[in-house]
Image (spheres, rainbow, N blue to C red):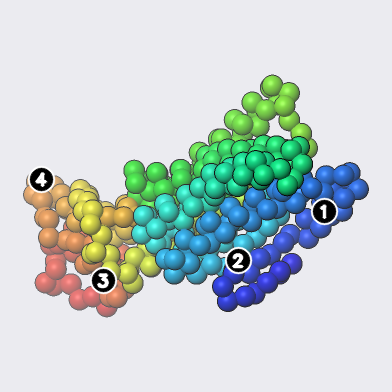
Amino acid sequence: MLMNNSKFLPPVHIHPIVFFFIAVAIITGMFIDLLIIAFIVIIHELGHFYFAKKYNWKVKRIYLWIFGGVMETEESGLRPMKEEWIVTLAGPAQHLFLFFFFYFLGSIEWFPESAVNTAMQYNIFIFLGNLLPIYPLDGGRILHLICDNLFPFQTAHSLTIILSMISIVTFLTCALLIGNTSLSLCLLFGFLFWENRIEWTRRHYKWWKFILYRNSAAAHHYKKKSILKVSKEKRLIDILQKFYRNRYHFIQVIEDKGTVHTDLTETECMDIFFAKKNHRLTVGEIVNREEEVTYV
Ligand SMILES: [Zn+2]
């Protein structure tokens, strides 16, 4: 359900099941708890939103459902990593602000001490839960950014999903072993597992989006340079799949006799692949037949 469409605030969608839980909370006397959780989740999401807007990101919506919220954007994986670090960390950072806010409320004694203590506990619980290394939680997004630094985009994305799934199974097994599990916890991990399964099926689409954006962006502005050593049999598509998110690439083509060509750049590879639509060439053919090849 769409809750607003203002120019300054993002559209907020609420999953219909939330209204069922509101009804259950009223009946079971947990309405105050629900209000506190909703307040914490909204402040958390507004933290992400503030910095996303600061960097002119396109925010599709903030989506709220029973276990929290998520700010949906099409910019993830495309913008400079510094921006994504800040937007990602801005959510968890709100819990520090909320800690002092609840502490202040406790000190002025306007609210019952039990309500303030409950708010403090939920704040810590949501903060720590959100930092679990599981995509799309913030901890999973941090994991993704770390993987992006260490591996090519395609590998980093797949690895994040695999590690997220391993984390889900590990945490759920631990919870079951220590007997500290509940239906809502199983539902939460089930939902997260499903999200990762969907993300896995979208991995090729995500990579193409990344590489198309890279083709249109001024990639040569990346400060970090990287040299990719490849054999002459490698096709262009194999080279593109080795591209890191925040680096500009130079390609060294190794010939049979060990001769090394170093005059192929990322921009040239992109140009041959996209503008000249020559998808089947190997890098060996490019560096050896550069003069003869007609790119059609
Ligand atoms: Zn968040």
Marked residue nearer the N-terminal end (1 or 4): 1
Q: Is residue 155 visible?
A: no
**Alpha carbon of mark 4 to alpha carbon of mark 3: how far?**
26 Å
Instruction: Single out the residue that lies furthest toward the front.
Output: 108
Choose between 276 and 81: the one closer to the eye.
81
Dot 3: within a 10 Å radius of its alpha carbon, few (fewer than 14), some, or many (20 or more) residues?
Answer: some
Residue 10 against residue 250 in the figure, above or below: below
Q: Position of residue 278 (x, y in %)?
A: 29, 70
Pinpoint residue 234: horizontal percent, then vertical percent: 26, 54
Kindly identify the residue that appears in the image at 19 percent across and 61 percent down.
265
Q: Quadrant of the C terminus?
A: bottom left
Under circle 3, the secondary element is helix
- Marks 2 and 1 sit apart, C-alpha to C-alpha, by 21 Å
Which residue in the structure is indicated by mark 1? Answer: 22
Give the numbered dot on residue 61: 2
Amino acid beneath label 3: Asp
Identify which amino acid the numbered label 4 is placed on: Gly
**Residue 2 image position (x, y, % from top left):** 71, 69
Classify residue 82 as left or right of residue 38.
Answer: left
At 76% from the left and 37% from the top, the residue drawn is 114
Counting residues from the start of the chain, the first of labels 3 and 1 encountered is 1
Q: Name the amino acid type tagged 2.
A: Arg
Q: Are marks 2 and 4 in contact (CB under 8 Å)?
A: no
Compute the Cα span from label 3 to label 2: 35 Å
* Badge 2 or badge 1: first in the primary sequence: 1
Q: Residues within 10 Å of mark 1 (few under 14, many from 20)?
A: some
* Picture layout, residue 17 above or below residue 10: above
Of the pair 89 and 259, the residue shown nearer to us:
89
In this view, the residue in front, 104 or 49, is 104
Which residue in the structure is indicated by mark 4? Answer: 258
Badge nearest the viewer, 4 or 3: 3
